[in-house]
Image: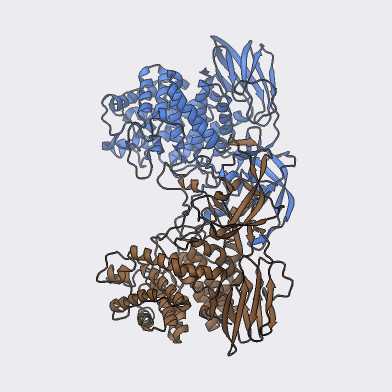
Chain colours: A brown, B blue
Amino acid sequence: MRRVDFSKTKIKGGFWAQKQELVKNETVWAVYKRFVETGRFDVFDFEHHTAHPHIFWDSDVAKWAEGVAYLTHLEPCPELEKIVDDLIDLIEKYQGDDGYFNIYHMLVEPDMRFTNRDNHELYCAGHLIEASVAYFEATGKRKFLELMIKYASYIEKRFIIDRDTPFTTPGHEEIELALVRLYECIGDEKYLNMARFFVDERGQRQEEDWDWASLGYSQAHLPVREQREAIGHAVRACYLYCAMADLAKICGDVSLKDACESIFDDIITRKMYITGGIGSSSAGEAFTIPYDLPNLIAYTESCAAIGLAFFAHRMLLIDNDSKYSNVIERALYNGFLSSTSLDGKSFFYTNPLEIRPELTTRDGSHKYPSVHFPITLRKEVFDCSCCPPNIVRFIPSIANFLYTCDDSTIYVHQFMESESEIDLGGESVRISQKTAYPYDGRIELVVDRDARIAIRVPDWCDLYEGETIKGYAYFNAIANEPIVLDFKMTPFFVGANPRVYDDCGKYAVQCGPIVYCMESIDNGEGIRDLHLDTSAEFTFGRSDELGVPTLHIDAYRRRPVDSLYYKRADDFYKTTATLIPYFAFANRGECEMQVWHFTK
Amino acid sequence: MRRVDFSKTKIKGGFWAQKQELVKNETVWAVYKRFVETGRFDVFDFEHHTAHPHIFWDSDVAKWAEGVAYLTHLEPCPELEKIVDDLIDLIEKYQGDDGYFNIYHMLVEPDMRFTNRDNHELYCAGHLIEASVAYFEATGKRKFLELMIKYASYIEKRFIIDRDTPFTTPGHEEIELALVRLYECIGDEKYLNMARFFVDERGQRQEEDWDWASLGYSQAHLPVREQREAIGHAVRACYLYCAMADLAKICGDVSLKDACESIFDDIITRKMYITGGIGSSSAGEAFTIPYDLPNLIAYTESCAAIGLAFFAHRMLLIDNDSKYSNVIERALYNGFLSSTSLDGKSFFYTNPLEIRPELTTRDGSHKYPSVHFPITLRKEVFDCSCCPPNIVRFIPSIANFLYTCDDSTIYVHQFMESESEIDLGGESVRISQKTAYPYDGRIELVVDRDARIAIRVPDWCDLYEGETIKGYAYFNAIANEPIVLDFKMTPFFVGANPRVYDDCGKYAVQCGPIVYCMESIDNGEGIRDLHLDTSAEFTFGRSDELGVPTLHIDAYRRRPVDSLYYKRADDFYKTTATLIPYFAFANRGECEMQVWHFTK
């Protein structure tokens, strides 16, 4: 099974074309401006900078540059390319003779290079490497790649050859998957071996001493091959799991594959929000115990949803099981998309599944809150602003998730109005999709020569009657004869496992891949007391303001009560509830929001 | 309207006689032993102590001694009296010549006397004064009282005459009500004026500078007469409100009365758990915003339930409205009683309304938890052990809540198997109650001469058909002819105001004044997913192990589900739920518990 790179696909219209336009016209510039304002670009000029660099600023800009590479690939953007070229010149100018490059350490703590495991040096290096690979592949310009090859060699020297660093694995994973990517780009096994070194070393010794986190925080509690559960910081975890899956695939490493499979199943059966968000606890931005998925204080970092999609995509290359592509779909349309405002200019770092604005003021008389609630409106930039540039690189390359192939079959994982060219056993096949997905389940696929096609039947669709293998329907497509599938999109209620404390007694609403939510701006305050009628029919509507479909259903509300407690009386009145796609929440000011509803 | 002191009543049997026996035989000794072990008694001997005193240790022991005084009143306890006499000798020995007495400051920071508003000196002084009054009234021994009169004069000199302290009101209220009590004991208006000074000064200036709390934390955000809402630390607040109500009553102070009435209504209509617990936030042990009554992280300090009962009792003396006596009942049988194990030896400082043991382990990879959960089992002693001795003084004097009177009428607020002697317009009236309350609503009252009697009709009883004035039924009792009331105790479901976030969609179960709860030890794990059938009938049972009645009702549980999310199907099976009185929870090891249940 092979990847089909996003560059082989043109997204020609529909949902994702509009999102890509938005990134090109708005998001990439919005993030750029905020990064300029906060000094993140300024500090690349070691001689003239005025800002004080943070330990992870290199990675913020690197991810942004990676996004520019992908945009450039889709359509030339000379203005953005110039900005990246200038950055590369600065990196070239200030990179150490030995190859080392890290803004914070070179400017602030030059003597502390590679001494603090939690200082994100290798994390920044990883993102710089990824950006350099992407930029080379997009533009053919090799300078950035060469600089990073030099840096990678320096890393190899220090960590693997000389072994003179006080730690052997970084606190924040990323270098591992970046090295695999470098290997895949230039074919030198040295980088594959380096990736394997960093993966294999993790958890072999008790090498950290952080007063605020246990070893599991950075997945260093056990050798990775012995790990079976997702624990610790969710983004760090997913980036590690990506590298593990890469190595499992490339090296045919069965014990890594077994670990990845168990960890993935642990996530999707016990630790994932219905939105595909993961990492529910603000303490450590981390996975917690199984079934602990609080809605109000859901952490669910945007980067973690991205990380989960990356991980699932790599697992799909090992085993074409729709559990992986279903999770990608879930994250794409919900927990990932919610990260960005509909105008493309502001972002959630955390993505709560419930908002009650007044609760954030609960600790008025005390200056330390008892519970940390996520912010209720998106912001343009954060002190730790890893998510916005991750979005900038994610959406332009979204078509990476569309197809995989082997020598005889094209696997169709996602549905997007698009045209692609896929190399199938040495021959080029053009494949096109016509669809209004995710708002309509009709998909028309055409190939320009006979080919075997496997199409994912989405997990939300229980009406498909054909045969499937691991969730995929197989067809012998005839050249230029459309294959039409129509996955009926009827809104439905979703329950959570009874062990999920916070969802007990409640149901979510989904239509197709899209999870819907309620906001008080549409339903009046106190939406928690709006009980949806499970025996009623949903009707469809549309919000012109948001540009999204809406759902409407009969609901019941208790009549206002004066007293704090009262003898139960069935005193409800009938009303209508309005739901909007979860990803569109918090675009009309601060208000109550919830994904899980009481029903009646 | 006048108090009827507990000393006028003999509780002869039934529920409270058993609780008083338990305090006398177990609790007072259990607390004593833990206090000896932790050095709280040791430090009274300034020359030979080895423990390091804490700033509030004086008050812990003072409350315990006050409890001893009440026990002595009920029945001689020479052994306990000897311990208190020895303590008094030590206080006499080490009290400053000027009258000052504070263990922490005299032993640890002798130069810092009355310099730190948050150091609990006046709080300790208040409890010592209360204990001295109680001990004098119980035993006739005057020494302790005289020592405290001397201390009170020193406090007057420093705070009111010389005004040479850097703060004018204490961070933790208590001195105010203690001074009223001293005034009522010995009749010297000086102490009343001192109480008024401390009450009136509060909130007049921005005198604190705590980095962790705002002025409202200690109710210093506004002059007390302008306060209309309960805010800040709940115990501090209630002790202040007690003094405000005392002064409103004694001085006929209308603006204080108005403030007290508003604050009381704010508590009972917006900030009180169904158990009578108050102060829902662990941040500051404080009241939070209206309707913010989380169950899992309910703080509801035991001392706050006691403080609320004290406050309500004082309000009842101003206005004979059953809203006050109903709250006392609610606190007595629920949020207060839950504080103590059924064997009388261990205690809850906080009284959660829901326990899910596994959630306390949610932050495994991070060393700082994201949410602080209350402890799940009672402990014998705490670092801050204010609650256990508060219980020791509360239960022996519980009959304080039974009656009040004016010149012509006896007001019957609570129901206890008892005999009392009440001075009614100069004549002594004997009044007896026969009842199995709180487990049976039949009350037989007998007076030994004709008298007007007003009897509270409990708020849980909606079947009483006679006329009532502010919740009281009035009778012209004829000498030795029983008045029999039978408040039918039928279990019922209670809803919370829709604005209470955490109780939305759920109902509690109450029978008579007792709130019931479910524990997983009776119902299997995952009690949150046990949906009680509101159309079914409750049946009564009994737990011999706990010595309490039980309730049983049809309920529904979802069948186990493998996946994390599933399309809704009404896949419930029928079972039976067992409920026990809330006050009896956590007496059989750690397990799940909840007061609010989903229903079906």
Q: Nearer the viewer, residue A444 or B383?
A: A444
Asked if one can make out residue A449 in the rendered structure from this viewpoint, the answer is: yes
Q: How many numbered markers are drawn?
A: 0
Q: Is residue B6 left or right of residue A411?
A: left
Residue lying at the far top of the rendered structure? B426
Q: Nearer the viewer, residue A289 or B467?
A: B467
Q: Is any part of residue B68 visible from this angle?
A: no
Q: Give the image quarter of residue B57.
A: top left
Q: Where's residue A520, x and y in %?
A: 55, 49
Relative to residue B382, is residue A173 depicted above or below?
below
- The location of residue A15, given as percent across then percent down, is 56, 68
Residue plotted at (44% across, 18% down): B252
Spot occupied by residue A246 in the image (x, y as percentages of width and height): 52, 78
The percent coordinates of residue A486 (x first, y second) are 69, 70
Extreme residue in the bottom direction = A426
User: Among all residues in the image, which is located at the extreme front?
Assistant: A544
Q: Judge left or right: residue B304 versus residue A516.
A: left
Work out whether residue B507 or residue B485 is closer to the camera in this orientation and state it.
Answer: B507
- Residue beneath the point at 53% across and 83% down: A251
In-image side of B115 versus B542 (left or right): left
Q: Which quadrant would residue A80 be assigned to in this image?
A: bottom left
Q: Is residue A11 above or below residue A448?
A: above
